[in-house]
Image (cartoon, rainbow, N blue to C red):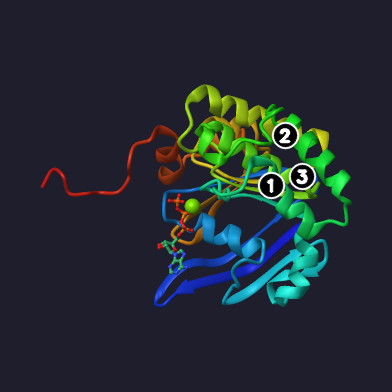
Amino acid sequence: MIDIKLLNKSFGDKTVLSEISFDVLEGQSLAIVGQSGTGKSVLLKNMIGLMKPDSGEVWIDDELISGMSFRELQLVRTKIGMVFQSGALFDSLTVGQNIGLGLKKLTNLSIDERENRILESLADVNLQGTEDLMPSELSGGMKKRVGIARAIAIRPKYLFYDEPTTGLDPIMTDIINKLIIKLQKLYNITSVIITHEIRTIFEVAERVIMLNNGKVIYNGSSTKIKENEMPIIKSFFTGNSVVDLGADK
Ligand SMILES: Nc1ncnc2c1ncn2[C@@H]1O[C@H](COP(=O)(O)OP(=O)(O)OP(=O)(O)O)[C@@H](O)[C@H]1O
Ligand SMILES: [Mg+2]
């Protein structure tokens, strides 16, 4: 279980996250949504220890990770997989080597076991036979799936996705959504998914957290959020801005 308690984060005099509290239960899939620049990626980085909160706590399985040193964090990281917003593959390494890096660093697998795990992880994302390709030879959708294969290769208990479908066409978005559901079931993974994609919210997530102006404005089921009457929530789903840009003046 992940438990966030009264988390605050500012950059200079700009408050990005203010008194954020929520939890993620075992096996659950949670979507974090909200307008661009509202602090979703910053929240995720705080959740996995890549960034420290100014105050507040992040607990993962009864361990206080927000106060941990880099060394202590390495141990917790063995149960956390991360699919980055940009894909973040190393361009000079093959697909297989990209996946192998984390396995070498975070597991005790032998070379043979690592090789098998690389092939197994690529098969999990339907990219069999791509282990010797370079990232430059992959399409955007393939890169995203290699990023997912790399994250699941360590068999994490928790998997964090930062906008896994941004920039993909509707069919690839559907493929990635189905993949997230499949992995969730296959390895009993707890997933936290930052997304702008309405379909991901309804098809993949059981629960939704919506951020606005640094605060949690919705924390509840993904089916009920559609019925919510708050203008800012409604506008997110209709795509109409509630911000007055003064266009009629
Ligand atoms: N390392 C940093 N130093 C200073 N400001 C930062 C830093 N990281 C993020 N910010 C600021 O925090 C705010 C939230 O950024 P964040 O990347 O979390 O937004 P987001 O909700 O993920 O947006 P998007 O949907 O566009 O990815 C932004 O104003 C950003 O400029
Ligand atoms: Mg972001």
Q: Are marks 1 and 2 in contact (CB under 8 Å)?
A: no
Q: Residue at x 84, y 39 (%)?
A: 116
Q: Residue at x 70, y 74 (%)?
A: 70
What residue is pinned by disc 1? 97
Q: Residue at x 53, y 22 (%)?
A: 171
* Residue 229 or residue 5, whichever sits in front: 5
In the image, residue 51 lies at what x, y percent?
59, 69
| Mark 3 element type | helix
Q: Nearer the viewer, mark 1 or mark 2?
A: 1
Horizontally, residue 125 falls left or right of residue 85, namely right
Q: CA distance from mark 1 to mark 2?
A: 12 Å
| Mark 1 element type | helix
Q: Which amino acid type is shown beneath numbered disc 1?
A: Gln
Q: Nearer the viewer, mark 3 or mark 1?
A: 1
Q: CA distance from mark 3 to mark 2?
A: 9 Å
Determine which of the numbered discs, if any, sits on residue 7 in the image.
none
Examine the rendered structure and indicate whether residue 188 appears above or below residue 35: above
Residue 207 seen anywhere in this rendered image of the structure:
no
Q: Residue 106 falls in which quadrant of the image?
A: bottom right
What residue is pinned by disc 2? 122
In the image, residue 78 lies at what x, y percent?
79, 58
**Image quadrant containing the N terminus:** bottom right
* Residue 185 or residue 140, whichever sits in front: 140
Q: CA distance from mark 3 to mark 1?
A: 12 Å
- In the image, the residue with mark 2 has its CB under 8 Å from the nearest atom of ligand 2: no
Q: Which amino acid type is shown beneath numbered disc 3?
A: Ala
Q: Residue 143 falls in which quadrant of the image?
A: top right
Residue 74 seen anywhere in this rendered image of the structure:
yes
For marks 3 and 1, the one nearer the N-term is 1
Q: Which amino acid type is shown beneath numbered disc 2?
A: Leu
Mark 1 surroundings within 10 Å by alpha-carbon count, few (fewer than 14), some (14 through 19), many (20 or more) = many
What residue is pinned by disc 3? 153
